Amino acid sequence: MNGEWEFCFDDDKCGEEKDYPAGNVPLERKINVPFAYQSAASGIGDKDTHETVWYRRTFGIQDPAKNVLLCFNGADYRTSVWVNGALAVTHTGGYTPFQSDITRYVKKGENVLVVKCEDGVNMTTPRGKQSFKNGGKPFACWYVPSTGIWQSVWLETFESDCISRYTMLSDIDNGLIYGDVTLMYGIADELKITVKFGGELVCEERMPIEEKRNEYAVYVKRNGKVRLWDTTNPNLYYVDFALYKGGKMLDLCHTRLGMRSVTVENGKICLNHKPFYQRLVLDQGYFENTDLTPPSAEALKEDILLSMRSGFNGARKHQKTEDPYYAYYAEELGFVTWCEMPSAYDYCDETAENLISEWAEIVSNAKNQTSNICYVPLNESWGVDAIAKTKRIQNFAAAMYRITKAIDPTRLVSTNDGWENIDETDVVSIHDYAYDDAEFDRKYIQSDLNTLIPAGRALFTSGAKYHGQPILFTEFGGVAMQAEATGENWGYGVGAKGAEEFYTRVKGLIRGIKRCPFQGYCFTQLTDVQQEVNGISDYGHKPKFDTKTLKEIFESVEEKG
């Protein structure tokens, strides 16, 4: 359903009074969905804040005998949906998908869909990098907001029952793919699971369905071996879930999974029980003209390929949940990713409720992504500024860790990435934009981590201490070019005068990291983003530097013994 919709602002919040939900009132503007109205690609490009927006379009139904599922990949923040004047679904959360069976509301022929989105500049809701000051005006490293629909919208049809969600996890030691399959209505009576590798059948199992949610486990070893997924050999098993009722197929879901494990063994982060040094790039997922929305699936693939050509084996997706195509290409190309919660910025009970509920949804969705190896519930104490000495907020951070582990215990968690780490974290993360590698030596070689202050903030909260976790340097660099860092445009530290100075500076930073006891790093950043011009590519995602030279620099890090 992407494309042109009717659209309007509702600054007076009187859309209900004007009977917009009924769908009989045409809206005054046009917008190109799924792009937010602030973006040029939407066809509007209005940067001002409008807290309430409305959408309207018609759609046809040819076969009224089939059920109709309406799906949204993302709409920020509170969304209400009417179909032919009936309220069909509401959803809260800008970074999570939702769906609804709208069969009871549709009719054969033309139907009317109306959507209302409410998204004020509210510091208690998850905003990520969307500005939360001065009516949404960009500042520092926060950017133009993205209000309303910002990811794809589509319709699906199904028979009397369908798969509403599924989970897939891998157990490489026992050769199992396991998880659960949840049905929309529980009408189906049989589930068939088919697993193939390289086009050849690995296994096929049928199981009776007795509940809406059904656990499963299938054995995928062949000749005693499992084809593992890693960054060198991104092997994938293709899985089909088929629902049946009385022998008739009701629904078929195609998916895939890489068999791999993420563990900490003898203090080392391991992928498939082998030490794995992470060379990550910070990727904020913003695009020129389309803002938070990728212009195409191919653009996401190109970002991964650019990262790999530049010497990185993964990305820390920063302060957003990405379009599912990103994970699709990452697992296909052998590229690891981190999943991060977009921050809120004013801690209170409402903030805690908003973050916990949306984060639980995000983790539930991300646990199916082979490339995802680490979760970040909080970043740099954003929105939890008093965490260093406030037990209540430390308890909240610990709760975010425990919730993550309760939903997905198979991956790592960096609870408060950057500094002010709590005891409940699988890794100790450090952010430091120092641009002198000698400073790295002074701070991080044989230092007492319990007293370390990497960037003006203590590495641990009061009462917490280092427990031998792996240490990762998850933000550094941020070097801009002097010619670009003018006016409101900026980078970290003093800008480089040219490409050669940039290479020299980054080489120095990498030399410093090589001497430190880190098990990986994350370099800032992949692209320029609006006023922040410290990317290795510009805002149009075109490389600013020679990727072969960058690859030599970033791959020169050797794992510390």
Image (cartoon, helix red, strand yellow):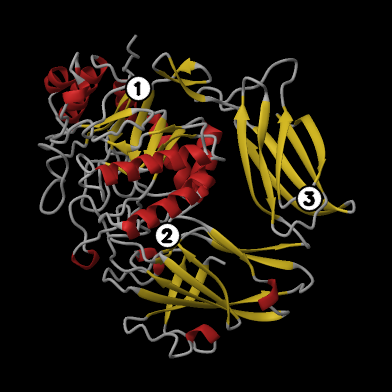
Answer yes or no: is residue 311 visible: no
Provide residue 541's location: percent of width, then percent of height: 34, 45
209 to the left or right of 364: right
- Disc 3 target residue: 243
Neighbours of disc 1 within 10 Å: few (<14), some (14-19), many (20+): some
Task: Indicate which disc residue 94 carries.
Answer: 2
479 to the left or right of 195: left
Residue at 73% from the left image edge and 42% from the top image edge: 240
Provide residue 6's location: percent of width, then percent of height: 47, 78
**Of the image marks 2 and 1, the number of the one nearer the N terminus:** 2
Provide residue 471's location: percent of width, then percent of height: 31, 23
> Helix, strand, or loop for circle 1?
loop
Q: Amino acid at mark 3?
A: Leu
Tell how many labels. 3
Residue at 54% from the left image edge and 85% from the top image edge: 23
Q: In front here: 444 or 514? A: 444
Q: CA distance from mark 1 to mark 3?
A: 44 Å
- Disc 1 target residue: 469
**Of the image marks 2 and 3, the number of the one nearer the N terminus:** 2
Neighbours of disc 3 within 10 Å: few (<14), some (14-19), many (20+): many
Q: Amino acid at mark 2?
A: Gly
Neighbours of disc 2 within 10 Å: few (<14), some (14-19), many (20+): many
Q: In front here: 552 or 369? A: 369
**Of the image marks 1 and 3, the number of the one nearer the N terminus:** 3
